[in-house]
Amino acid sequence: MAGRSEGLALEPLWHASQGAVDAVDVRGGPLPAELANRYRDDLDIPLRQDRPTIIANFVSTLDGAVALGPSEPSAGGGEISGFSDADRFMMALLRCVADVVIVGAGTVRTGRRHIWTADHLQPALSGAFAAWRSELWLAPQPTTVIVSASGNLDGTHSGLNAPGVPVVVVTTRAGAERMAMGLFSSNVRVQVAGDGDRVPVGSLLEIVAGLGARVALCEGGPHLFGDLIRARLVDDLFLTLAPQIVGRDANVKRLALVEGASVSEGRGRWSSLIDVRHAGDDVFLRYRFAP
């Protein structure tokens, strides 16, 4: 469907002055012409040497809502962004430079027909995405990493059955046993990360690193993002501000209230704004977290 900001470029408004970075330590660079028409700059992701670089991407309303919660079980990022085409392009661009896309089980259940690739968001640009990934020496598609402690996943979900898109489900031992009783595509692999009732983020990081990933993109949900923030594992946050307000609804999940990210608990992290751009009424912010 044609959405808000259809075809608009993400025009740069401000960029922080950065020191020189050795090219071998960066993923990205100049974009192919078709993509550069929409994103008017190079896109550089600094690579860490000690672990995979983790970037996160969220769209938020002006009052901080990132998900509509149980009251709107079918509502995902599209409802938050007002179905912004520019936001979908930004998501696609980040997927294009990622080795893996990490999503929580709740996010998976919200979008039953979603596939976590750049092509799915911007099919008309699939050739440009493929060319850039090839130029960057990346696999044709990023691996989808689904975090589900319970293993309660629908084997018929489109994102678990897309040809050429590998899927790794990171779960607990009980979750793996549950999945063993279901029917899943041959491209779905299960990795056990502990015996408890939650997936430890440290184990998740080890599994992502074991996949050979240098850049991991987290697309939520907010609790998974909160766990990564609490563990000081998020390096950059790409945040789209959509021009709408949802108001005071107890079911709304807000980025500012992510579990485990409260400054009052001594777990907050300072971040620096390093890039601002806009497409129509959408504002695109990029923050870099202090080590």
Image: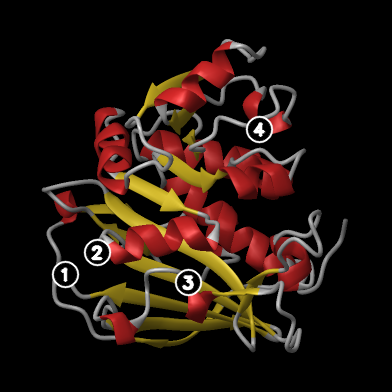
Rendering quarter of residue 126: top right
Q: Position of residue 86 (x, y in %)?
A: 67, 68
Mark 3 and mark 1 lie on one chain; the one further toward the N terminus is 3
Check whether the beta carbons of the residues at disc 2 and disc 3 lie within 8 A of each other.
Answer: no
The Cα atoms of the two marked residues, 4 and 1, are separated by: 33 Å
Q: What residue sits right under mark 2 in the picture? A: 232
- Dots 1, 2 in contact, CB < 8 A: yes
Q: Earlier in the sequence, mark 4 or mark 2?
A: 4
Of tags 1 and 2, the one toward the viewer is 2
| Disc number for residue 159 | 4
Q: Nearer the viewer, mark 4 or mark 2?
A: 2
What label does residue 188 carry, if any?
A: none
- Closer to the camera: disc 4 or disc 3? 3
Residue marked by disc 3: 258
Label 4 element class: helix
- The residue labelled by disc 1 is 291
- Other residues around mark 1 within 10 Å, as few (<14) / some (14–19) / many (≥20): few
Q: Does residue 178 lie above or below 44 as drawn?
A: above
